[in-house]
Amino acid sequence: MPKSQYVDPVEVRKKGKITFKDIPVNQYDKTIEDEKENFSNEDFLRIYRDMAIIREFEKMMNLIKTTGEYNGVPYNHPGPAHLSIGQEAAAVGQAYLLDTDDFIFGSHRSHGEILAKGLSAIQKLPDEELMKIMKEFRDGIILKIVEKYGQAETVKELAIDFLVYGAMAEIFARETGFQAGLGGSMHAFFTPFGIYPNNAIVGGSADIAVGAALYKKVNRKKGIVIANIGDGALGCGPVWEALCLAAMDQYKKLWEGEHKGGLPFILNVFNNHYGMGGQTRGETMGYDMLARIGAGVNPEQMHAERIDGYNPLAVIDAIRRKKKILLEDKDGPVLLDTVTYRYSGHSPSDASSYRTKEEVDSWMAHDPLITFRKQLTDASVASDETFDGILDYARNLITRILKISIDDSVSPRMDLIKDPQAISRLMFSNQRIEKMDDRECEVLMPKEENPQWQRVQKKERFGLGKDGKPVSKNKAYQLRDGLFEALIDKFYTDPTLIAYGEENRDWGGAFAVYRGLTESLPYHRLFNSPISEGAIVGSAVGYALCGGRVVVELMYADFLGRAGDEVFNQLSKWQAMSAGQLKMPVVLRISVGSKYGAQHSQDWTSIVAHIPGLKCVFPATPYDAKGLLNSALSGTDPVVFFESQRIYDIGEMFHEGGVPEGYYEIPIGEPDIKKEGKDITILTIGATLYRALEAAKILEEKYGLSAEIIDARSIVPFNYEKVIESVKKTGRILLASDACERGSHLKDMAQTISELAFDYLDAPPVVVGSRNWITPAHELEQFFFPQPEWMIDAIHEKILPLPGHVPATNFTKQEMIRINKFGV
Amino acid sequence: MATPVIMPRQGNTVESCILTEWFVKKGDKVKEGDLLFSYETDKAAFEEESKVSGTVLEIFFNEGDDIPVLTNVCVIGEEGEDITPFIPGGAPVQKTEEPEKAREQAAAEMPADEAKVSGETKPQIKTGEVFISPRAKNLAEKIGADIRFATPTGPDGRIIERDIRKLQQEGHLVTAAAKEAYSGMEQQLQGSGLGGRVTTSDLGRPAAAVEPSGKAEPVPESGTVSEAEYEDVKLSNIRRVIAKTMHESLSQMAQLTLNTSFDATEILDFRRKLKANAEKMGLANITINDILLYAVSRILPKHKALNAHFMGDSIRYFKNVHLGVAVDTERGLMVPTLFNANLKSLNQIAAETKELAKECQKGTINPDSLKGGTFTVTNLGALGIESFTPVINPPQTAILGVNTTEQKFREKDGVIEPYMSMSLSLTFDHRAVDGAPAARFLKDLKEALENFTVLLSL
């Protein structure tokens, strides 16, 4: 809601109509003769060669999957193979004009795109650079193999062996593949050639690629970004969200200087007419022609058009025109509806029962391997023998590479017996990188002149006065100030850092953490996004894996579901799936609410903790908030950063001397003893800390028991040593948080503590969580969220009966049986 | 054939010893005479040497374990030999198992014992299964608490840590050796062993005076036998016992000290004569201290309140004099007992005292010799001390401190003459003895020493 743009009621209420421009459909109509001015005979033949290599590669995959043998070489591949036989012309045509600065992101069906883009890069790169790339990639592991076992006479031939081998070994889960076999068929990539991650989640690449385009735009990097998805993906919400984020008005209206203008982004749909077995046109979608969608996105209609993906030259022509729109006119984004067809099923298990043989046959009659060849022979570009020679070459290439790819002595799998930690080491990159780039930070004023920064400096950095009472909220340095200080500091340190989400700019974030940042930061470093949680997180993934650092925000933990795939499948997985080639310096801020009922009050830390590959923290004090955010912002791993709305305004009550003015980090994974005691340990996550302190007071005053309070601070990773030490001392432990009790991560912790300290326990670890209900209205929340009295009751009932205590709540075993029996 | 090494029995009343340090580990080669481990009772420390050569095949206990005497501690033999027959309690552990495992096995047998116990009908004892938290169970094992007497206060009738702590305070402790026999008894006994544990010797006693400890008998107050005390390996057992005894002595008694001096001319002359003639008469080297011991042993029977044990609500008077003789050793203060000193000659006293002191220095003293004193003599005279306040060794009622000799002057028939004087410091427990009777003892003792040759002729 920039104030500079006035929402004028007169304008808005005026009578009128929306008009559309025509959307071109297969307008390309040049002949080979026409194109001879743009392509040499060699170019034509290379286009054909690239298509032939892809066809042979996919044919090999199909035969291996369906017959267990290719060209006399037997092999069993149990993994996936979503083949693009029939889609070669579209892939080769797209890649033809792209260079290594142009990034493509793909889908589960992207073998063809990888090969096409790789072959295009090999053609364009000078030999020395090719050698350098091959030598440096994974210390030359692939180069050594293709040098030893290949027959290449030139660097380019060697590079083709390298490309085909890297992809094939990856598909066959070999340690020598592009991603050491950890990506596989649906996730292979090779960034030195501009081939970015392909994605097994339908439409998964759309918002990630928007993030990559954002990275190029913000950091003034060359090139365009293409998301290649299938027509089936148009039914996915996140794809629509990606379009919304890619087409925001602000790029052209509010961003300034060099940053003004649309994103260099193409959403390219390889429209093969089927989303698995569902026919998108005529059955499962309503757009009739996919390109129509562009008209619904922005006035430029996304420069959408349908192009003929069965003619490589038509695709090349389109990419030439669209690149100009993106880079010269700065008028992106673009939507391409690239018509194509796959002869093979969705996967080898697909019997194609949803289409007729006639349909497949008629498309085969249009097969570019036949029709394009005929056009070229007709135009006397080459003889039939030449084409037969190309096909032989392709068969020979694929056979040769297949043999070494499946040879265990050449291409072994990751040895998890010899090195059991090989994958676990890759789950996090655990690096500390202060800034992702060395250039100057783009800011609007020195940090010291920022009015909000100045206000924060005047606050009381310790939250308790000399009398031990909390200082007034207005004077106290609050938890949100700790977050603000960490953020503004990093904005002045790391030039790549950007932050966005809903209400992030002028509003200052729904909870005023970003208040004041607008004054310091240009639009392209802090901006409002559409209400598109999926694309917010997905684009952050793309921004980070390209080399930037980003903080994005989901206003409430309850909205995590809206970004489920992006958090659980993308943010968490790419570091390990890339075998450590990609880093993911993303901080995902998530606020845990209260007062707003069932869909705005849930603590979902447990769900995040369950997913491998995410770090997860939940500070509860200003000191911890600043220190942990500093750590998160200097690391290279994705950190889901939980904050509680209940305590944004709380002062620092624990750290002696208050929150330091300077920079400091608190290591992620280390719990903190907030109060020492000897009779019982209480471990809390998040804001429940303060209720546990109240419970400790009751225990002390009424029952003479001294409680040791440990604040987990981090959930993943988590160092149990301090907790076990405490339990050995006290023999008893209660765990409490605002998460619903069933499936709470605290149960996991309780179980771990039971195993690690069984002999020291005087009673089983007991978890007190929220009820397994909906969160009721604020006025009833005391019956839902754990209260100090509940903790006393649970201790009395399950751990240490307290003389004279009369429980007010039911923590009996019968009640446990009952709530589980009824699932409540 | 493999040879088991047992925990030696150091004295008839010793039921268990604490293994303080291992000098070998499993797999080590040892020669005859090599040190295997050190161990201690509450009164003395010892080292065990290997009696055979071979390989340490298995170790059954860890440092800090309280091990019943005569139990196999480790096995030495040739590699590959079967050690199964030597596993304490005959638990069927595998050969490759670590000592911890063996211990766990032993611990695992516990419930069976308890089940047997609980099968019988007894007061305070639960029938059926015993529910006890792992922490409480470990604590009970460690301190030797008798869980049959625990009152469960945990959820669902579970015995929890505080219930075991209560047992400890109430003195329901039992040694490993006495455990089985004791578990069959219905009465509760007052323990006299380490930390107030019921020992096998207690099992023979009637169940009289079952009162919370500290009242019936001045056994160590169990509330201060903290868990940490047994875990703290830095403090030797001897030091611990001294610390406890001395502190309890000062904190629980009404002690005061009387000082006097006597003319030492006669005993010094007498000592000179002895020294000159000791060899040819076949006498022991009789010291001034021996002379004092002799005098005390002869005077004490007339002052029975000082040759007694104060028992809280009763006083035990002894017919004979069992003199505690304080000996300064490297390990710390030790007080061996010279039994029936009043029946022994000066020569006997001198010889036996020397022998006891020697054993204390070497650490080979029989723990039985460190008990049973009725009165103690401590001598700091050799160190030039002129006066001090000795601390009573409970439950005794008095202790005599012997100081240095010094030259004094007195007027005799108008002439100032020098003489050798020696002073004595008597600390007594005012709960048991009043000032005048204590002073009378000192007066009698002073007269006896000034006329020692007369005393000898009695």
Image (cartoon, rainbow, N blue to C red):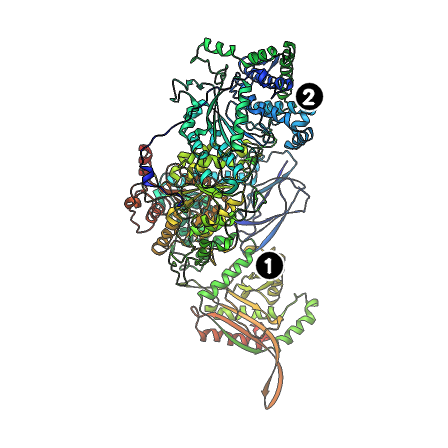
Question: Where is residue A284, by image quadrant?
Answer: top left
The amino acid marked with disc number 1 is Arg
Of A310 and A80, the residue lying toward us: A310
For residue B126, which quarter of the picture? top left
Is A793 left or right of A264, judged from the image as shown? Answer: left
* Badge 2 amino acid: Gly
Between residue A151 and residue A704, name the one nearer to us.
Answer: A151
Q: Position of residue A405 (x, y in %)?
A: 62, 21
Q: Quadrant of the C terminus of chain A?
A: top left
Disc 2 versus disc 1: nearer the observer: 2
In the displayed structure, A696 sits above or below A191; it is below
Q: Is residue B394 shown to the viewer in this render?
A: no
Disc 2/disc 1 C-alpha distance (Å)? 80 Å
The residue carrying mark 2 is A150
Q: Secondary structure at mark 2?
A: loop
Task: Name the residue beneath numbered marker 1.
Answer: B331
Coordinates of residue A1 in the picture (x, y in percent): 39, 43
Horizontal relation, residue A595 to residue B105: left or right = left
Give the x, y percent position of residue A329.
51, 33
Which disc is residue A691 wearing? none
Residue A358, relative to residue A219: is it above or below?
above
Q: Secondary structure at mark 1?
A: loop
State the residue lying farthest toward the bottom: B414
